[in-house]
Amino acid sequence: MSLRHLKMFDKVKIFTGPNDYHFKQLYFEEVNEFIVGVDSGLEYLLNLEKPIDLAVGDFDSIDPEKLKKIESKCKQIIRLKERKNKTDLAYTLDYIYNHFDYDKIEVYGGISGRVDHFIANLNLMKKYRFSIKDDHHYMYILDKGKYHIDNFKNYISFFAVEDVYGLQLKGFKYSLDNYFLSTSDSLSVSNEGSGDVSFTKGKLLVIMSEDQKRGG
């Protein structure tokens, strides 16, 4: 019997580093959610009033005293070796994919920080199909079809993960009609507003974003 069908969750919510987003602004509790902390992202879950369902990582970046508190809150802990052939997030997504059934996966964090880690996370999005967010960004991938998008950020951009055919953008500040968007084309960056998206072939990365305010 496949382990993946042991339990069904509406949403799997994964909290990962870098810890530069506001947990209380992004997270709100929902029915039948499964809470996962990945390495340093576990620190955001310390003050959560409910247990942490799963903790994954080598935990090398967590203060030992905080780690003790985290361990007391966790239902399940998977300890990884420091030297491994997958990132902590990649291991977590693979484990969830193979052990649970779910409607959606949301990843919190994993965008800012090192550019190579962010590109690795983009590649993971192609395989596991999750949304990813922080204070200033929200992104996900669409398959061919028709969609209405309510953009809640200042900007919205569209990039081809695989060449996109027959792209139509309606209702946004800038429209397109039957456009071929290749993986090397950046035409659809920095659009604005909400609207309808449709395309007949390919995979489309949607990025909602806003400028980060600088102090001083």
Image: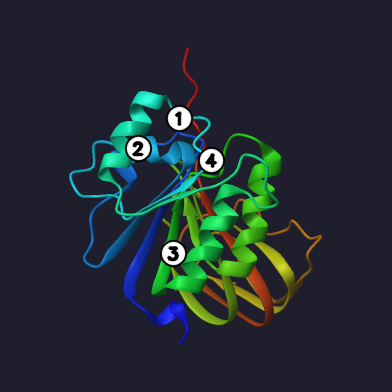
- Mark 2 or mark 4, which is nearer the start of the sequence? 2
Kindly indicate whether the residue at mark 1 contacts the one at mark 2 (C-beta within 8 angstroms): no
| Position of residue 172 in the picture relative to residue 76 (left or right) | right
- Mark 1 or mark 2, which is nearer the start of the sequence? 2
Q: Check disc 2 and give the amino acid type.
A: Tyr
| Residue under numbered circle 1 | 62
Q: Residue furthest left?
A: 49
Cα separation, mark 1 vs mark 3, equals 24 Å
Colour theme: rainbow
Tag 4 secondary structure: loop
Tag 1 secondary structure: loop
Q: Check disc 3 and give the amino acid type.
A: Ile
Cα separation, mark 4 vs mark 1, equals 9 Å
- Mark 2 or mark 3, which is nearer the start of the sequence? 2
The answer to which of 171 and 182 lies nearer the viewer is 182
The reply to whether residue 140 is in sight is: no
Residue drawn at x 73%, y 58% as measured from the top left: 187
Q: Nearer the viewer, mark 4 or mark 3?
A: 4
Q: Which mark is residue 44?
A: 2
Cα separation, mark 4 vs mark 3, equals 22 Å
The reply to whether residue 2 is in sight is: yes
The answer to which of 38 and 154 lies nearer the viewer is 38
The answer to whether residue 172 is above or below residue 107 is below
Tag 2 secondary structure: helix
- Which corner quadrant of the image does residue 5 belong to? bottom left
Tag 3 secondary structure: strand
Q: Which mark is residue 58?
A: 4
Cα separation, mark 3 vs mark 2, equals 18 Å
The answer to which of 179 and 82 lies nearer the viewer is 82
The answer to which of 24 and 208 lies nearer the viewer is 24
